[in-house]
Image (cartoon, helix red, strand yellow):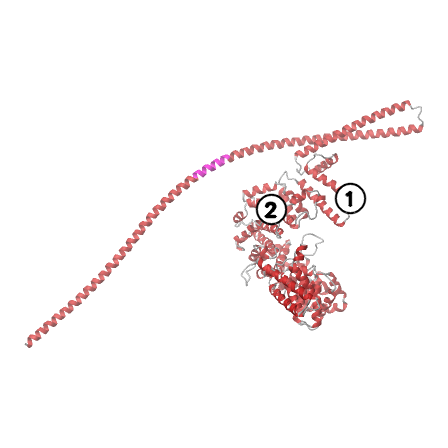
Amino acid sequence: MVSGMSMDVLAGYFQRGHICAVAFYSEPGASQTAALTEILSTLVRETSTIDPTGRLQVPTDPVQRQNSPVLQFVHLANELLTFSEITPSLRSKLQLLFFNLCQYNVRLRRFFAGELNLVNSVCFCLKVSLQEQLGPQNLIDILRLLQVLTYEKCLTIGGWLNDLLAFLLNELIRTNEAEWLPYCVAILSNLVSRSKRVSQRILKNTTMLLPLKNQLRKFLSHSSQTVVVSSIVLVGYLNEETRDVIFAPTHISETFFCVFNVIKGGGSFMTRHVAIDLLRRLIIADNANVTFAPTLSTTAKNLTTYEFFTSSIQDVASQLVVLDYRTEECMKIYEFLIAVCGLAQLRSPVCQAILRADPNQKRLTTPILAMSRTAAVSFEEAIDPEAPLLAAELLTLVLKEAVDLNLKIHDFVPTDVVIGIVRNNVKTPIETKSEYVSYQCRRITAGLRLADAISGDEHIRAELFEAITAPLCGHVNESQLLSNPIIAYMSKPPGQRGVNDLPDWSRHGVTIPLELLQLLASLKDYNKAYKELYWRSLKDERLIPFLAYAISYGDASTVFDALTLFTHCTQLQDFRTKLLSDLIASCALTKSRHAAAASGSESKSANASLDNGDGISLSSSQGSNGLSAIEVDRFLDKLRSNLDHHEPKLSQIVQIFEKKIAHMTERQRFLENTIKEKEAALSEAHRQASTRTNNVDTCEMAKFRSILASLETKQAEIETEKLALQSEKELLARELAKQSLSFENLKTLFDTSRKTVESLQNDKAVLMDENQKEREVQQTLRDKFKEMTNKFDQATNAVFEKDRELVEMIERHEQLKREHEAERKRNAEHEAENARLRSENATLLAFRERMTKMINGEL
C-alpha cells in the first residue's frame, strides 16, 4: 500500500509539470523545453506501475476538480498534443504518460475518452506521425493509446472518425502486413463494438468492404491472438457469410475453444479484455428488453457437453492466481465468472470446475485461495474497491456449491481464512463521511452472504458461531434500523419523496437486514440465541420499510432476498402485510411522480388524485380517527378484500366499525328527517290540491301530478336506501359481534398465555435455584479436586526427591566402584612390579654368589 507521502509526491510532480507546461505553452524556448522534458520523463517513470498510478482520483466536486493538479495538467497536456511548437520528443513523452494513466487507472481513462475527448488529439498525433514519418515505434505508441481509449463505451465520437477509419481500413487490406496490424484490428473492433454508426459506415463503403471481408477470413488463422479474437468480433458485425459459418452449431465449439485459448494465453495488452467480452456475449443472451434475468444464449446451449469446457473454465480461473488482483484484467475475469454463474444451467458446472482446479504451476496456489486472498484485502490496498467485493461474491458461489455437494470447505480453503473473511467483513464499520461508505455496506452484505453459504458445513459451524455471535448480528441489524434514512424516507407521503433525498450508501444498506435475517434463518436451528434474535427481528416493524424499498427499487438479487424474507415474515400472524403493500404501492406512486416530473407531463388533477390516494393509504395504516365517510367505506372495501390477511389490529377494526355505524346512524337520521319533510310537503300539497281543484286548469293539474309522481319516486328510493342501510347496519353489527367474540377468544388466549408464562417463570426460578445448587456442588468438587491435586503434587515431589537421592547414591556407588577397580588395578600392577623386582633381586643374588665363588676360587 502506498503511503500518503507518495501520493503527495506524485501530485507535486503533476503540479510541477503543469507549471512547466504553462511556461512552455507561453514561451516555447529551449530552457522551457528542457524543463518540461525533465518533468515528463519523471512522470512517465513514476506512472509506469499500478501503484500509485491507480490511486489518482477524478474529483466530482467542481471546486476540487478546478484545483486538482492532475486534471489541470492533463487538460493542458491535451492542448499540447496539438500545439504547433511542440517537439516530437515531447509529444512522444506525453503519449507515453497518457498511456500509463489509461492502462492502470480506469476512472481516468473514462474521463479521457469522454469528457476530455483525448481521442481527437491522439488522432491528430497519428496524422502528424504519418506525415512526418516519425517511425514505427512512435506509430505503435499512438495506436496503443488509441486502443485503450476506444475500449470505453463513454467514447465521444467526433470528426476524427472518418480519418481514423480510412487509416485502419487501409492498414487491414494492405498487401504487406505491418507490425502494428494487431493494434489496428483491435481499434476497429473496439469502434465497431461501441457504435452502430461505425458498422454502418463500413458497410456502406463498397470499395473497401469486399477486400476487408476477405482479409478478415484470413485473419481468423493469424499467428497473433489479438488479430484472431478481434477478427471474430469484426466478423460478427461486418461479414454475415463468415459469421453464419463460425457461429453455426457445427463450428461453434471450435470458436469457443479458440476464445478460451486466447483468454488463457492473454496475447498483448487488452487482448484478454476483448476475448472475455466476446465470450460473455456468446454465452449470455443479450435480451435485456425481454426479460430481467440473464438467459443462456442459443450458441452456448451445448457448452457444458464440450470436452474442453471444464479445463477451459479452470484455465480462466487460474488467471486469478497469476494476474495482479488490482488490475482491470483480473476484475474482468471475476465479473465474467460471476455472470456465468448467474445462469442456472452453468452455475454448478462452473463452480465444480473451479473446485477441482489444480494449483497453478507458477504459484502453487489454487483459484479459491486466490479469491480468498483478494476478498481479505482492504479497500485502500485493493485500489479499486470492487476487487475484494467481486472476489467475495465469487468465493460465496463456489463454496456454496461445495456445501451443496456435501464437501468439506477446509479441503479447499483453510477454516481460519474463510472465517477471518466473514468476521472482518461483518465487523466492517460504516463511516457515513467516508468515500468508501457504499462499499462498506456492500462488504457487510458480502460477509453475511458468505456466512450463510458456509453455514451448511457442520465442520465449520462452531467457528462460525464464534466469529459472528448473536450480539454482533443484533448490533449490525440495529445499526441499520437506526442509522439508515430509509425508514424516514418511506414514512413521507410519495409527493414529498425527492429523487436525491436518500444518500447512495443507504440503498446498499437496505440489503444488510435482509441478508442478516436469511443468515439467522439458517442458524436458528443450531443455536438458541440466533433463534431468539431471528423471531425478535421478524417482529420488528421497522423492517417493513426495508422490505418495501427492496421490492420496489432493488435489483434482481435484492428483490429475491426481500421476497424470501417476506415468506419468513408471513409465519407471524400479526405481521402487517397491509402496511407493506401500502408502502410498495406508495413507491409505485413515487416512481410515477418522478417520471412525470422528468417528462413535464404531470397535470394538477393527477397531483390531486395522487394526493388523495396518499392520504387514504396513510390513514388506513394508522387508524380511523378523523376519517370521512368515504374514507371509511374505502377502508372497509379493502378490508373485505383482504380478510385472509390478519394485518389490521383489532382496535383499528373496532374503531372503523364504530365510525361506520356512527355515519350510518347519522345518515339514517338525516333520511328520516327528509322523509318527514317530504311527507309534510306531500300532505300540504294534497290539501292545497283539494282546495284548488276546481280552480286549476288541465295544464297545472298535469304539472302537479308530475311533481307528485317525482316525489313519490324519491320517497320510494329513500325507503329502499333506508332498508339497505338497515341491512348493512345489521351486517356490520354481526361483524362487530364476531370481532368481539374474536376479541374474547384472544383475551382468553392471552390469559392462558400469561398463565403459561407465569408457569415458565416459576420453572425458570426452580431451574435457576437448582443451577445455583449445582454450581455450589461443582465449586465444592473443584475445591476437593484442588486439594487432592495439591496433595498429589506434594507426594509426587517427594517421590521425585527420593528418586533423585537414589540416583545420586547410585552415581556415588558407581564412582566408588570405579575407584575400587582403579585401586585394584594399581595393586595388581604393584604386585607385578614386586614380582619383577623379586625376580631381579634373586637374579642379582645368584650373580653375586657366582661372583663370590669365582673370587674365592681364584684366591
Residue 664 spot, x, y in % from top left: 74, 30
Residue 585 spot, x, y in % from top left: 70, 43
Q: Which residue, as the protein is rendered here, is positioned at the far left?
A: 859
The image quarter containing residue 55 is bottom right
The residue lying toward the viewer, choosing from 751 and 799, is: 799
Q: Which residue, as the protein is rendered here, is positioned at the far bottom?
A: 858
- Tell me the residue that label 1 is attached to: 604
In the image, which disc is placed on residue 114? none
Q: Main secondary structure of the magenta part?
A: helix
In the image, the segment drawn in magenta is 765-777
- What type is the residue that disc 1 sits on? Lys
Queried whether the magenta region covers residue 76, the answer comes back as no
Residue 57 spot, x, y in % from top left: 64, 57
- Tell me the residue that label 2 is attached to: 518
Look at the picture and state if 531 lies above or below 161: above
How far apart, in angstroms, are the residues tagged by discs 1 and 2?
44 Å
Q: Can residue 735 be seen at all in this image of the molecule?
A: yes
Q: Residues within 10 Å of mark 2 (few under 14, many from 20)?
A: many
